Amino acid sequence: MVKHLVERRLADVSQRLRRARQELAVVDEQLRALADTADEARIRSLVSETPLAVKEFHEAQRQAEAMEGARQKLASQVRRLEAEMDELLYKL
């Protein structure tokens, strides 16, 4: 590959990696909050033993699991971008 093309591609990948890492940090924070909410709902459902509390727990747990899935996708994207960046740096 021509050097200036590699440099341009490297700049693009670097920018995408920066954005993906920022998104991952936000998702991590949201996941912690959702996990805490799910844990509190679980405790409430165990203590109160009402159908409504159990339903609230299951809903909170589903939200936390969905956010975990989003986090895993982002983490995978970050790893792919890091690998692509390493490959481009090697080509330089």
Image (cartoon, grey):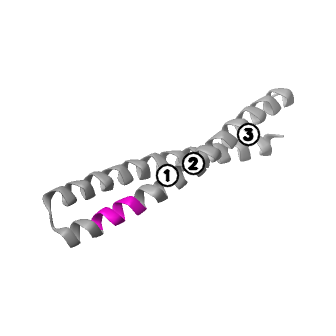
Would you say the magenta stretch is mainly helix, strand or loop?
helix
Q: Which residue is mark 3?
A: 14
The answer to the question of whether label 2 and label 1 lie on touching residues, with beta carbons closer than 8 A, is yes
Q: CA distance from mark 3 to mark 1?
A: 24 Å
Q: Is residue 63 visible?
A: yes
Q: CA distance from mark 3 to mark 2?
A: 19 Å
Look at the image and tell me in which quarter the N terminus lies.
top right
38 in the magenta segment:
yes
Please, what secondary structure does the residue beneath circle 3 have? helix
Q: Residues within 10 Å of mark 1 (few under 14, many from 20)?
A: some
39 in the magenta segment:
yes
Compared with 81, 30 (above or below) is below
Residue 39, by quadrant, is bottom left
Residue type at mark 1: give it: Gln
Which residue is the extreme one toward the bottom? 47
Q: Which residue is mark 1?
A: 30
Query: Sequence order check: which comes first, mark 3 or mark 1?
Result: 3
The range drawn in magenta is: 36-42
Q: Which residue is mark 2?
A: 26
Please, what secondary structure does the residue beneath circle 1 have? helix
Residue type at mark 2: give it: Val
